Amino acid sequence: MQPETGINIMEEATVTENTSPAKFSRRTALAAGTLGALGLTLATATAGTAAPGAKAPKPTLEFRADGTFKVVQFNDTQDDEQTDRRTIELMEKTLDQEQPDFVVINGDVINGGCDNELEVQQALNHVVGPMESRQIPWAVTFGNHDEDSAALSGMTEAKMLAFLQSYEHNSNADNIEGLTGTSNTQLLIQSSKAKGKTPAFGLWLIDSGRYAPERIDGQDFSGYPTWDWIRMDQVSWYREQSIATERKYGAKIPSLMWGHIALHEHRAMWFDSIDSRTDTDHTRALTKHSIVGERNEDECPGPFNSGLFNAFLERGDVKGYFVGHDHINSYVGNYFGVQLGYAPGAGFGAYGLPGADRNRLRGARVFELDENHPGIYKDTRLVFANDFGIDLTANRQTTVPALPINTGKPGKPGKK
């Protein structure tokens, strides 16, 4: 896919004067071997009423005694069994500095370069090992590239999920029968103040899919983005789970959500416009939407607006939705009360900026929660490989493949 010309805004949100920046050619996506269901089920629950089957989970995570909780987002680790050593170094140094309570790898955990099941397991093991060795709870969302090697390796997302769930500290939910996507997950964080199973905050993980189908009603997608989109049954699932959670606990639970592919609203926020995309539009958006960060390539959502943001507005519990997918974007802003943002790509083996700057934006996003802060969600910030003195040379530096570890998670034997 050839994206449109990007606008580069530095982390301090200073507007560039360059009116003709060079185009960036995004890595061409591989054709998907399998497609998810269209998921066109309409939401049937009315406001305040959860659909049959919706059931709020119990808290599985806990705020610290001082009321704090920290989340780290990595995304696009996107490599094969010979993972670039600097990806692991970035993850380890971020974890050691930040000491998070939870980690999400937000899609494109691996790429299509694995030739068999063992190599897929090795690639996954490399990037979950830093959390496992530190006993930090973690989970993944799936991206468009995770299943690219399935034709050769036989490792579908379902098989990858089973392998990942075998690790002791994994928090991914099982697949829900009939629901589009792999491991759509709702997690609740136990309050440090209230007794019993009383959640103070929530974390949502949603599968934004892989690639659009070849045709719908005989019409192809020539001229349209060919990425996937969050389907209506998933929007309904979020809405119904949100309602069920409010009913069970007597209040809406403020939350954050992660999905791999950006929403159309990310682009609308950047330009403060649906139709116009000029420097003047963005200058207006900087103040209106409190935008900071860089946009070095076009957002790459699917061809259709999922309606997920509209559900956020209706429910009022999701305070931020964060993505990856577009490796060299790092911005965040407030779009009508909901933060929309990126973490830059963490994987040194995946595409980055052009030329010698290839690895300048490798990094992670950190989220600070505090029960003593109004709304609990304080804010978010970025850390970069450069902050840790990691080599940013524009080359590839692979690791030696390691066998998957035998985790022995109770009830789910580890894979050898």
Image (cartoon, helix red, strand yellow):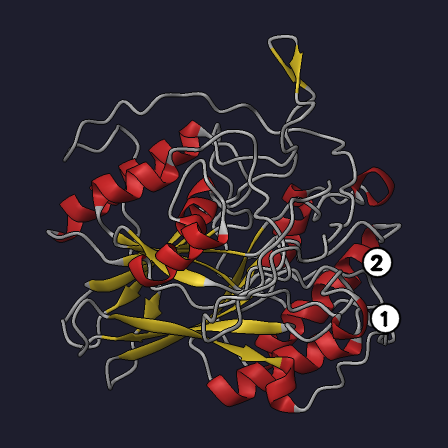
Inspect this view and state whether residue 166 appears. Answer: no
Which residue is more in the foreground, 388 or 13? 13
Q: Label 2 amino acid?
A: Glu
Which label number is shown at residue 119?
2
Residue at point 52%, 44% (across, down): 207
Q: Quadrant of the C terminus?
A: bottom right
Asked whether 276 or 75 is in front, the reply is: 276
Seen in the picture, residue 327 relative to 259 is either above or below; the reply is below
Question: Eyeballing the image, is 335 above or below 363?
Answer: above
Give the residue at x 62% y 82%: 92
Is 350 positioned to the left or the right of 175 in the image?
Answer: right
SS for callout 1: loop
Which type of secondary structure does the marked residue at label 2 adopt? helix
Q: Residues within 10 Å of mark 2 (few under 14, many from 20)?
A: many
Measured in 3D between alpha carbons, the distance from the residue under mark 2 to the one under mark 1, in whole angstroms, is 8 Å
The circle drawn on residue 401 is: 1
Lower position in the chain sequence, tag 2 or tag 1? 2
Residue 313, image x and y in percent? 25, 43
Residue type beneath disc 1: Pro
Q: Residue at x 34, y 64 (%)?
A: 290
Is residue 187 left or right of 89 when viewed as pictured?
Answer: left
Disc 2 + disc 1, Cβ < 8 Å: yes
